[in-house]
Amino acid sequence: GETSTALRRGMVAPSLAATTRLLRPSLVARQRCSVRAFEVPFEVPSAALLADAAAETSAVISLDALGNDIFFFLLASVVVVPLSRVLNVTPVLGFLAVGCAAGPFGLGILSDSEANVQLGDLGIVFLLFIEGLQLSPDRLLKLGNFFKLGLAQFILTIAAITAANLYLGPQVLPAAERFILLDDELVRPILSTPVLAFCLAGAGALSSSAFVLPELKQRGWEERADGTAALAVLLLQDIAVAPLLVLLPLVAGSGPQSSAELGVLVAKATFGFGGVLVAGSVLLRQIFSVVAAARSSETFVAATLLVAIGMGVAADALGLSTTTGAFAAGVLLAGSQYRQQIEADIKPFEGILLGIFFMTAGANLDPALCVAEWPTLLSGILAFLGAKLGLL
């Protein structure tokens, strides 16, 4: 009776009132309760219906949060890029700073972090797709000449960082702690656990295409020999993500337990994706010929997005990275007569979504933690840079 009266007077929490409004009268149990000497019909919802209604309400709230985040991303894109050009700095720094300020460790404006990360990942997919589009057969041959460089960089970096963590680190740490206030809870597990040392080395051997490629374009270094070498190394690192993800569970003891399972994973990544590439080389140009014949710009843009994302999804399903699939799709269409139109259609999506990627990356940065752990953080950055520069 008290609950019924409170509902009629609007005295309960808005979420419960909204949940009750979502319930259909035909699906709830009816009960009569006495209020002030007369009977009022009142519908008592079942637990299952309450749970369904709460899920619907949560979905609505999530969509609202995502809409607010997208509005903020677009607003930031309009402001950050022109301001960065005025200040003569890369927009990447601006997006990172805005994301850090608006993230959960700052003002808390950004809320739906998982959906935002997925949106940002699409920016990297489109970035690699466009890179593949721009590869002529001659330039692709030049990239092949630097394959050994990329492979050597990847393997040697993993070996050097792992060895330094496990063998050199324990010797240097006691002397370093005399002068630097390091956090033992963070440092010692890395220096004493081979799995952690290898994971850190694997991450350190990789670079971010999303960070480096825009800088190469902005500085006009893409056609230079060092720019071509950097692109080749980045592409090999993207390809190496797949075997690294297979290897890490094996090192940790939670991966495939038999050689047959491991063989299936390798077969999927090689023969499976090879079959996708063969089919794509035959079908993609035919698909775009049919789409172009329809003379519909909307259909052409939709086909472009479908190919870029679809190849990424196919590569991910076969155990490779989505960026590898998107890059392969771009390479397959590089010699197409529609290459310039495809690039023009997808370029705006790439720029906006890359901005979202950098802002979500900045939102994950906790300034308070960085300040509290600055001796450990700074020491790790300097050691990492020293190892990378020494290997290069």
Image: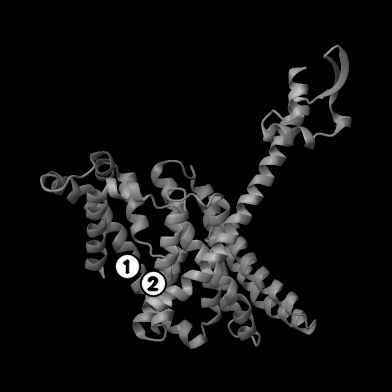
Point out which mark residue 153 bears.
Answer: 1
Q: Residue furthest top?
A: 37
**Quarter-of-image position of residue 272:** bottom right
The quadrant holding residue 142 is bottom left
Q: Which mark is residue 233?
A: 2
Question: Residue 78, how many percent across, how many down?
Answer: 53, 71
Relative depth, front residue between 46 and 307: 46
Q: Is residue 89 depicted above or below 318 in this figure?
A: below
Which structural element holds mark 2?
helix
**Residue lying at 56% horizontally and 80% vertically, measured from the top left:** 133
Q: Residues within 10 Å of mark 1 (few under 14, many from 20)?
A: some
Asked whether, in this view, residue 185 is left or right of residue 139, the answer is left
Q: Earlier in the sequence, mark 2 or mark 1?
A: 1
The reply to whether the C-beta atoms of the residues labelled 2 and 1 are less than 8 Å apart is yes
User: Where does residue 292 sit, x and y in percent of width and height?
Assistant: 75, 83
Q: Is residue 321 placed above or below 347 in the rendered structure? A: above
The three-letter amino acid code for the residue at tag 1 is Gln
Query: In terms of secondary structure, where does tag 1 sit?
Result: helix
Q: Which mark is residue 39?
A: none
Residue 390 as seen in the image, left or right of residue 229: left
> x, y (%) of residue 248?
42, 49
User: Where is the N terminus found, in terms of image quarters?
Assistant: top right
Could you say which quadrant of the image residue 118 lies in? Answer: bottom right
Q: Report the amino acid beneath label 2.
A: Val
Task: Where is residue 145? Give x, y as percent.
Answer: 39, 80
At 64% from the left and 77% from the top, the residue drawn is: 281
Measuring 30% from the left and 45% from the top, which residue is drawn there? 194
